[in-house]
Image (tube, rainbow, N blue to C red):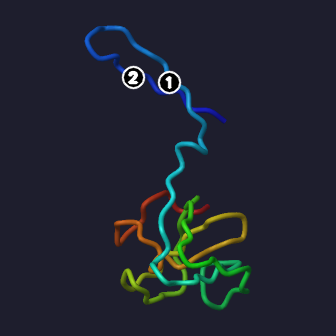
């Protein structure tokens, strides 16, 4: 899947089409320093542990959904970040720069 953006060329009326892939446009966010973050099969601490992200990990958030309320380095929140199929992490451990949703809700 590619996305086409139109950019104004400096100093003129010409337009230049710039094509980029959706993956290149994806934003990744850092996990809190010194944290090995649990990845769960659903949006809550009661879901099965899928894997553990190592210290220094970054995550790409596909969508977000409410779940178990968790307190972490970035506050207390019930927002869970979907980072892959059947993979969720507590948003309170991810530095998104926001106390709220930074992307669409999971459907």
Write down the residue under mark 1: 18
Assess disc 1: are there few (<14), some (14-19) or many (≥20) residues with their C-alpha within 10 Å of its C-alpha: few
Furthest toward the top, the residue is 13
Relative placement, left or right, of 55 versus 42 is left
Label 1, label 2: how far apart the Cα atoms are = 7 Å
Tag 2's secondary structure? strand
Image coordinates for residue 38, horizontal then vertical, percent: 62, 83
| Residue 8 drawn at (x, y percent) | 34, 19
> Residue drawn at (50%, 24%), measured in percent from left and top?
18
Q: Residue at x 47, y 73 (%)?
A: 94
- Residue drawn at 28 percent across, 9 percent down: 12
Instruction: Give yes or no for contact between labels 1 and 2 (Cβ–Cβ under 8 Å).
Output: yes
Q: Does 76 appear above or below 53?
A: below
Q: Position of residue 30 (x, y in %)?
A: 48, 68
Image quarter hosting the C terminus: bottom right
In the depicted structure, whether residue 90 falls above or below residue 22: below
Q: Earlier in the sequence, mark 1 or mark 2?
A: 2
Q: Position of residue 4 (x, y in %)?
A: 53, 27
Q: Which residue is mark 2?
A: 7
At label 2, counting other C-alpha atoms closer than 10 Å, the crowd grade (few under 14, some 14-19, many 20 or more) is few
Residue at 56% over, 32% down: 20
Horizontal side of residue 74 vs 29, given as left or right: left
In the rendered structure, find residue 70 and report the number of the disc placed on it: none
Q: Is residue 60 above or below residue 50?
A: above
105, 54: nearer the viewer: 54
Left or right side of 50 for 16: left
Quarter of the picture containing the N terminus is: top right
Tag count: 2
Q: Quadrant of residue 2?
A: top right
- Provide the secondary structure element on which disc 1 rests: strand
Image vertical order of residue 98 relative to residue 51, above or below: above
């Amino acid at each position: 899947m590619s996305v086409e953006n139109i950019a104004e060329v400096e100093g003129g009326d010409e337009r230049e089409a710039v094509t980029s892939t959706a993956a290149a446009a994806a934003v990744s966010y850092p996990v809190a320093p010194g944290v090995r973050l649990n990845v769960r099969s659903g949006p809550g601490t009661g879901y099965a542990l899928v894997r553990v992200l190592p210290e220094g990990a970054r995550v790409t958030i596909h969508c977000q959904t409410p779940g178990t309320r968790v307190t972490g380095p970035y506050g207390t929140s019930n927002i869970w970040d979907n980072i892959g199929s059947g993979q969720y992490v507590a948003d309170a451990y991810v530095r998104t720069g926001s106390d709220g949703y930074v992307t669409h809700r999971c459907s």
